[in-house]
Each structure stands twice: as C-alpha cells, then as structure tokens.
Image (cartoon, coloured by chain):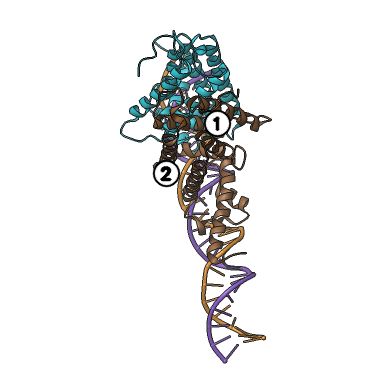
Chain colours: A brown, B cyan, C orange, D purple
Amino acid sequence: MSSSPLDNTIDRRTQILRAAMVCFAKQGFHQATMHDISAEAGISVGLIYRYFENKESVISAMADEHKAEVNQWLERARQAPTLVEALEVLFTSHCCESSPQVLSAFVVDLFAEASRNPRLADLLRDVSKTAMDGVTDLIARSPEARNGVHDMEPRELAELLFALNDGMLMRDVLISNPEPAEIRERQLHIARLLWRLLFASTAEPALT
Amino acid sequence: MSSSPLDNTIDRRTQILRAAMVCFAKQGFHQATMHDISAEAGISVGLIYRYFENKESVISAMADEHKAEVNQWLERARQAPTLVEALEVLFTSHCCESSPQVLSAFVVDLFAEASRNPRLADLLRDVSKTAMDGVTDLIARSPEARNGVHDMEPRELAELLFALNDGMLMRDVLISNPEPAEIRERQLHIARLLWRLLFASTAEPALT
DNA sequence: TGACAATGAATGAACGTTCATTCATTATAA
DNA sequence: TTATAATGAATGAACGTTCATTCATTGTCA
C-alpha cells in the first residue's frame, strides 16, 4: 500500500501544505510562522526547508493547489446535465467544499496578498480566466441562456455570476454566528433566484 | 485657518491615518511598519504613539473611518431621484471614489484581517448591516422594484446587489493592466444590465 | 549470515534581522 | 518657566532561515 521514495516526498509535501492551509486560514500568511506550520504538521521546522525553498514558495504551492481544485470543479460542472445544475456545482464547491469557512478566509487572504505580489496576482488571474472561459463556454452552448429575459452576452453573464460568487465568498469571512450553514443556504437561495431569472428553463417555472 | 489644541490633535490623527492608508494599501497591514507610516506622514515614529495606543488601534481607527465613509455614500444615495441612480452612486463610490485601486486593496485586506480579528469582524458586520438595511429600505420604498420580472424580496435584492459589489471590488485587486478605468467601466456596464433587469423603469427600456 | 559503511530524512538550537514599542532628550509655545 | 509636542536611538521579543548533528534504513562485502 505504501511508499516508493517518490511517494514519500509527495506525502510530506501534501502533509506540510495541509498544515500550512490550517495555519494560514487561522492566522493569515504573515502571522502564521514556520514554527506554527511545523507544529501543526508534527514535524520539525528544518524539515519544511527540505521540501520548500522558503515561506513564499509554500504560499505559491498552495495557490497552485487552488488552481488544480478550481479545474476539478469546472470539470465536474461540465458534466452536469443543465446549466443551472452546473452553476449549482460551481457555487457549492466554491463556498462549502470540505471545511467550513476555512476556505473563504484563505481565498480572501490570497486576493489580499495578490494585490502586492505580482507573481501571485498572475496566478490568480490565470485561474480566474480559465474558470471564466469555461463558464462562458458553458453558457454559450446552453439552450437555456437564450430563454432568459436578460439582454446579456455569455461573457457578461459569466462575469456577473463570478462576481456574485466571489462577493458571497468574501462575506463569508464575517460569519461567526451559531449557524454558518444557514447563511450559506440563504446565499444559495438568492443565487438560485438569479439563475432562474437569467436562465429560465423552458419547462415549468412554477416552483416558488 | 487653524488650530485650537483639539483641532491640532484631530489634524495629526487624520494626517497619520492618511499615511497609514497609503502604506496599508501598498504593503498590507502586517508588512507596513510603523516606521513606514511615520516616514509617509513626515513625522517621527514615537509621535504616532502619542495619538494611537498601538498599531492595532490605527487599524481599527481606519475601519471607523471606513464606516463613516459608507454612511456618507448611503446618504448621497438616498438623495438620488430614482433607485437605479441611487445604486449607481453606491457602486461608483464603492469602486472608484478617490484613488484608483488603493481602496480595493485596503478593503480586501480589511476583510482578510477580519476573519481572525473578532473585533474588526464585529465592526465590519455593523457597517455591512447599516448599509444593507439602508438599501433594503431604498428598494422597499421604490416603485421600480415592483416592475422587475424578478421574484425577490427587497432584502434578497439588497443582498444580491451587495454581493455583486463586493465581488467586483475583490476582483479589482487583480487589475494591473494598462487600463484599470476601462475594466471598471465594464463592471459598471454589467451591473447596470442587472439593475435594469431587476428594476425596469416604467419608461422606455429601449436603450441597448 | 553478520559486520561495517553510506545515506539522507529529520531535528532543533542558534543566528541575524526586523519590528513594535519605549523613553530620555530636545524643541516649541504660552 | 512650565507644559506640551516631537524626536529617534535603544530595547527586547519574534521571526525566517541555517546547519551541525543524530539515527534508522539500506547497501556492500566476506
């Protein structure tokens, strides 16, 4: 079941990245120390430097992981039977996926960091463009897009939907209430209303 | 033109806050040093500590300023003759106001910071609630809100519009292109299309 | 097989630097 | 003179990073 030398290296890297994700989400990039990360991973500080050149390269490795994750979402969305279902896939992965609001905090931090780290900004722009192109294409190919009452190009619709997604994600970091799930349910509800408005299926719209 | 002792104090404070805003936007909260801020303000480090208890209190003072600013926007929006014009006021202040994307970087940083600073999170939640209540009210009172083809409550509409705003603001930090103004123009264009869809004025909708 | 050599993953104390904060001192104004 | 404003060198804690050292595992040879 285990461990060619290559696998070991990959395992260590992902172990470190997982720990780093927890620390970054809890404390932010600049307040999480390498010692915090090593403690979270249950290894020594020095070992991190065997697998990563420095702290910044840990950060960009995580951005790379994020990129891969986004591509997976897009792949899954493409397989959905209808446009609205595809959007639902994208929305829920973006917002809820694995852990609660860990991801939100991390992504917002990523954007904040990108505003002064050009390399990271390039990476995020790239991720964003890929995802946006994918959704634009999804919309352009979808018959539902022609049924809506709107007056928008596929590209414009994609930009609208992504901004909405990101905005809701950004607002997630303020949640501290008893029920985070409840709030996300409400966000999803609102997003659905918009989708229905933009992409009214030709079938029954009577599901209020 | 100047300076009861109280005025002097206020001037110094705003001078420091203005410098801090520049530094925070350029480098982020944790990478901007107190020396950076003092240099930007053209004063000594020690003097900052005469007007602020510590670095964190500089940050929350800025959040307070942000709150006041948001309230001003809301006030101006309330005076607009139509709902769509009010939204335009809010959108453009949020995104363009004084300096270019300085504000975007700052606000995204503020949210990132709020995800681990409960006091700051409380403050932002408060700002957000005030603004949201204001817009909800604006929508509820507006006759146009009944004309749209949507199926949404005023509160839901407000949440939708705010998420859109924040999402576009968040995306602004990735801009580094030759023409930032061009991109914001496009954002405004898309936002307008949505507004028109949601709040179709009874007058001519023929302005494609 | 058993004795020895080589490897390199892993450790964590130590280093140099940076930074928020303090405070003794100096300038200014009343 | 006295009170207040302002300075910036000094402080000490915290951080990213390094590296001499340990030691379990693997390879080699008789």
Q: Are marks 1 and 2 in contact (CB under 8 Å)?
A: no
Q: Which residue is mark 2?
A: A123
Q: Quadrant of residue A119?
A: top left
Q: Residue at x 48, y 11 (%)?
A: B144
Q: Nearer the viewer, residue A140 or B60?
A: A140
Q: Position of residue A166 (x, y in %)?
A: 50, 33
Kind of element beneath mark 1: helix
Q: Quadrant of the N terminus of chain A?
A: bottom right
Q: Position of residue B200 (x, y in %)?
A: 45, 14
Q: Residue furthest right?
A: A178
Mark sitting on residue A161: none
Tag 2: amino acid: Leu
Binning the other alpha carbons within 10 Å of mark 1 as few (below 14), some (14 to 19) or many (20 upward) gives few
Q: Which residue is mark 1?
A: B56
Q: Nearer the viewer, mark 1 or mark 2?
A: 2
Q: Nearer the viewer, residue D17 or A140?
A: A140
Pointer 1 chain: B
Q: Quadrant of the C terminus of chain A?
A: top right
Q: Residue furthest left?
A: B178
Pointer 2 chain: A
